[in-house]
Each structure stands twice: as C-alpha cells, then as structure tokens.
Image (spheres, rainbow, N blue to C red):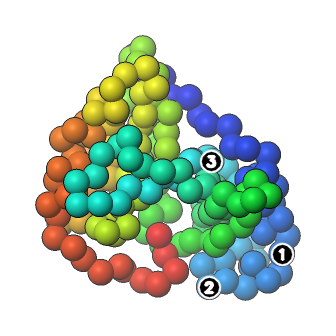
Amino acid sequence: MTLQTPQPPPSALRAVLGALDSETALRQPAAAALRHPTGPLLPAHPLAVHVLNGPRPELPAARRTGWRFLIKDGAEVAAAAEVVQSAEGHSFSHFTAGPYLDSTVRALREAWQLAQGSRTRRQPRLLTFPGQYATALWLHNPDADPDGDLLIPLAPAPLGVAAHRARPAAELLPLLARAPLAGPLLLGTS
C-alpha cells in the first residue's frame, strides 16, 4: 500500500496560518500549548475531515466538512487546528487538544508501516462518528469499493472497538453501529 498524502486547498492552509497569527484564536482553551511555543508553529499532516452519521453508517454517505492539521511546535505535536468549508473557501473553526492528538500521530505511523511493501494506493482521511463519539483514520482506496477501505480507530475508542487495530470498513462499521453510546470525554477536545 502506498499512502498519498492529501494536498489541502490553499484556502484551508491560509485559514490555519491566520489562526496561528490570531491572538483571539490562540485564547481558546485547547490552544494553551500554542501560546508559548519553543519554536515556530507549523501546520503538518493535513487530513480531510469526513463525518458519518446514522444508525447504519456506510462510507459513501460520509460527507467532507473540512480539514484538520496537526500543529507542530518543533518536533512535537502541540495541538490540532480544524477548518471548515465556507463560502470563501475555508475558515478556521477551532483548535483541539487531548488524547486524539497522540492517537492520530500513532495511527499515521501505523498507516505508513502498513504501506510498506504493498502496491495498493490509500489516501489518509479523518472520519468522525458524532453519534458514537468516535474517530478513525480512514485509509481510502480510490481504485476500489469503499467496503475494502481500512479504518484505524483512534483512542479512546467506543466500548467493544479496539483502538489502533486496522480493520476493513465493512468489518468495523457494523461494530460502531452496535457500540454502546458514551458521552464525550471533555468539552473542547476531539
């Protein structure tokens, strides 16, 4: 499998860079780690964000809502910035902090390891399941049926779903549909 890192639209990158220069945006609680950086703050690892709702979720029904960038302070990921599609292209939505940051980095590493020695093309995306308070790294194969796409659930995962275990979408989506609903961990984190 080869990973094809997505290129975000220029308006998405401009929105993130604008937020990193905005004192108002940096006042958000999730941006606390960005207020006193040890080096330049750089957006990295852009991932298209897709949302999947419904009692029987299917990947073709996922709708893209924007982009999420991991924000690096030197070599460390300090936060994430999310932009949403708008009439002007993209606009900054919010910063995030919390367990999904490290989990996203770990899932990206796992995806790169899976890519070694395979010829299948995959595009990494972020897939959120608001009704289940779940997020997964979605390894989309643009050349095949979406049921063959791989999903790597991020930690914390819903009960009954193992985090950081790559599974075919056709296998994981029914588990997510049956997973008991849980409340969000903390406001402002994702």
* Disc 1: CA contacts within 10 A as few (<14), some (14-19) or many (>=20): few
Residue pointed to by mark 3: 46
Amino acid beneath label 3: Pro
Q: Image height check: is 145 above or below 80?
A: above
Q: Image height check: is 128 above or below 131?
A: above
Residue pointed to by mark 1: 22
Q: Residue 29 shows which numbered tag?
A: 2
Q: Earlier in the sequence, mark 3 or mark 2?
A: 2
Helix, strand or loop at mark 1: loop
Helix, strand or loop at mark 3: strand
* Relative depth, front residue between 160 and 180: 180
Q: Earlier in the sequence, mark 1 or mark 3?
A: 1
Q: Position of residue 106 (x, y in %)?
A: 43, 50
Q: Position of residue 92 (x, y in %)?
A: 71, 67
- All told, the count of numbered labels is 3
Q: Is residue 52 visible?
A: yes
Circles 1 and 2 in contact, beta carbons < 8 Å: no
Amino acid beneath label 1: Ser
Q: Is residue 35 visible?
A: no
* Disc 2: CA contacts within 10 A as few (<14), some (14-19) or many (>=20): some
Q: Earlier in the sequence, mark 1 or mark 2?
A: 1
User: Would residue 70 appear left or right of 113 to someone viewing this image?
Assistant: right
